[in-house]
Amino acid sequence: MKIAAHTPDKLVIKTNSKTGLLVIGILLVVAGGLGMALIRVRPVTFQDLQTPSLFLQQQVDNPATDSEIETVSTNEAGYRIANYVGRLLFIRERPIVALAIISVVVGGVILLGPFWGTKLTFDKSNQQVQLKQPRWFFRAAVERHPFSEVYEVRVERDRSHGKSDRNFGANLVFSHHEGAPLSKNYVHYKTVFPLSESFRYDYQSAEAVVNTIQTFMADAREP
């Protein structure tokens, strides 16, 4: 998580981005694209599909008898088909081009996936916080909550990692209610939105982000 922008009217925080994975995706697309652009696949000629001379010599040295004609013909046909398919796939630059295509496809899947991170925008003029979470194909799901629903911004520690100094994170807690207060259909609940991808920050870093949000919202609520 990091503070991307901080102005008197807006505070933007970006979190949960898979930076390493996105870099790998970009490298795969670039490498695959260069491979496809620089390597030209030459057309297959008739000579490329000829049966290897070793197999032909074996047929000459070992002529089939009448009882073996059908069996040998079947084996030879299967061998020729396998030879044609194999040569079409693997002669010359085709393996490199195939790898380049796979690289572009895998890199494209990564770049089109929901790995770009979540963007939180605290808007003082509208008195609301906007959560923009990425989806596939560069789409995004957007949620908006008024400042009145922000119950708490807090630093949390992952105690499962013992005494490590980098096991802190930050959470944004929303308070919601449905129905009329004191009525039978009144429901109150809270939802926790993680500001950090995982508990991998030291206490000072997590506290700095939390304090910035708290200060910004305190100023926004002042008349």
Image (cartoon, helix red, strand yellow):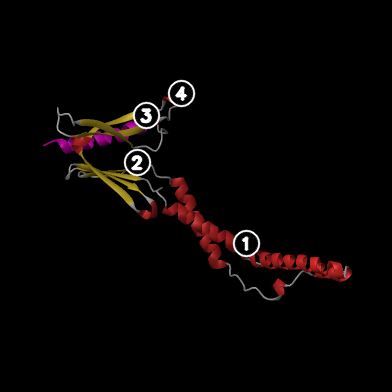
Residue 83 located left or right of residue 1: right
> Do labels 1 and 2 touch, CB within 8 Å?
no
> Label 1, label 2: how many angstroms apart (C-alpha)?
43 Å
> Label 4, label 2: how many angstroms apart (C-alpha)?
25 Å
Assign the N terminus to one quadrant of the image: top left
Q: Residue at x 43, y 53 (%)?
A: 111
Query: Local crowd at mark 4 within 10 Å, few (<14), some, or many (≥20)?
Result: few
> Label 3, label 1: how many angstroms apart (C-alpha)?
51 Å
Q: Which residue is mark 3?
A: 203
Q: Secondary structure at mark 2?
A: strand
Residue 62 in the image, given as x and y percentages of width and height: 88, 68
Amino acid bearing label 3? Tyr
Q: Which residue is mark 2?
A: 2
Magenta span of residues? 202-223
Lower position in the chain sequence, tag 1 or tag 4: 1
Q: Secondary structure at mark 3?
A: helix
Amino acid bearing label 1? Pro
Residue 23 in the image, given as x and y percentages of width and height: 47, 50
> Label 2, label 3: how many angstroms apart (C-alpha)?
14 Å
Residue 60 located left or right of residue 25: right
Mark whose residue sits in front, 1 or 2: 1
Q: Is residue 149 magenta?
A: no
Above or below, 61 relative to 160: below
> Do labels 4 and 2 touch, CB within 8 Å?
no
Amino acid bearing label 4? Gly
Query: Local crowd at mark 2 within 10 Å, few (<14), some, or many (≥20)?
Result: some
Q: Residue at x 26, y 36 (%)?
A: 213
Amino acid bearing label 2? Lys
Q: Secondary structure at mark 1?
A: helix
Quarter of the image for residue 191 reads: top left
Q: Which residue is mark 4?
A: 162
Mark whose residue sits in front, 3 or 1: 1
